[in-house]
Image: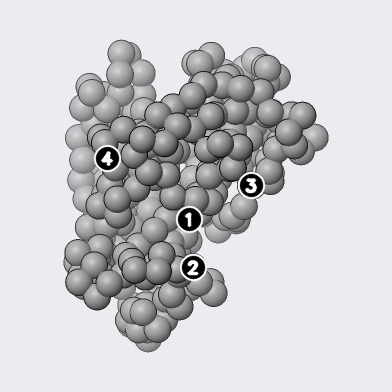
Amino acid sequence: MKAIVPHSIDYLVRGFDCGWGGPLRVLPMTNILQEAAGEHAIELGFGIPELNERGMTWMLVKADIRVDRLPGWNDRIRVRTWPSGLDRLLALRDIIIETEAGEPLVRSVYAYLIVDLASRRPLRPERAIPELAEIDVKTNGHCVPDFRFGVAELAAADRVPSFRQEACARHRDDNGHVNNAHIIDWLVDAAPESRRGSALTGLRVDFLKEVLVGEALDLAHGKEHDGKPSAALAISGSAGSEASGLVTEARREGECVARAATNWRHDGITTEAD
């Protein structure tokens, strides 16, 4: 087995990453996470450019992201990432954002498929990239030891419309579909807690279908299960109160293409979902 040294990127949080007076926004946060993942894959010899030459590509299908604390304007942060295992068709990768002193800020586990570009069907990762099966994943472990994937679908009666979003050319990535960072951003914005200024403390995401430029998505939200925070998303030691677990969905002509379970902190005041 081969030990992998985590890839590290230093980053200065700019004002445009934060918006007016706030901490790091969701879109730049997820862009930073995926940029680190992509850069490390290229360094290891199986990035998207290398896979494209072989008729394959990476596609993110699931994520578990925990937000301990978001950095603010002019903060210097470090992003570290490493491959963290195989689970049937899924190739796992851990990505963590830290302070320069090593304090964890955002911890995540991403699950990717390796997809045949012609058929758009998934391939066995250990066959498509044999090097993945040779990595010693125990050396670095997981930055989210209790990570889990999967978000329950909202019942039709529980869906509350949020907004409609059209996919534009600027949302497209190298795979020809809408980039995952934009979809995550829309799913978070679909939660009413986002518009109330609450602090995001965690989210799980399922990417179910590709979204193409020109398609319109209907975003909706609703309570998760019995309305209690998801245990897998609760952040121990966070200041303030945890809000009810909320599910948001993106649908294209009635078909769900992505959904997220989100948790929020209200700085001492717990507010129920609309």
Label 3 and label 1: CA atoms lie apart by 12 Å
User: Mark 1 or 4 closer to N-term?
Assistant: 1
Q: Residue at x 36, y 35 (%)?
A: 214
Can I make out residue 93 in this image? no
* 190 displayed left or right of 102: right
Task: Say which residue label 1 marks.
Answer: 61
Q: Is residue 127 above or below residue 174?
A: below
Label 1 and label 2: CA atoms lie apart by 9 Å
Q: Residue at x 59, y 42 (%)?
A: 255
Task: Say which residue label 3 marks.
Answer: 151
Q: Are marks 3 and 4 in contact (CB under 8 Å)?
A: no
The foreground one among 200 and 173 is: 173
Q: Quadrant of residue 238?
A: top right
| Amino acid type, callout 1 | Val
| Amino acid type, callout 3 | Val
Q: Are marks 1 and 2 in contact (CB under 8 Å)?
A: yes
User: Mark 3 or 4 closer to N-term?
Assistant: 4
Task: Say which residue label 2 marks.
Answer: 90
Q: Secondary structure at mark 4?
A: strand
User: Mark 1 or 2 closer to N-term?
Assistant: 1
Task: Say which residue label 4 marks.
Answer: 77
Label 3 and label 4: CA atoms lie apart by 30 Å
Q: Is residue 106 above or below residue 117?
A: above
Q: Nearer the viewer, mark 1 or mark 4?
A: 1
Residue 132 in the image, given as x and y percentages of width and height: 37, 77
Label 2 and label 3: CA atoms lie apart by 17 Å
Q: Secondary structure at mark 1?
A: strand
Label 4 and label 2: CA atoms lie apart by 29 Å
The 10 Å Cα crowd at callout 1, few under 14, some 14 to 19, many 20 or more, is: some
The foreground one among 258 and 184 is: 258
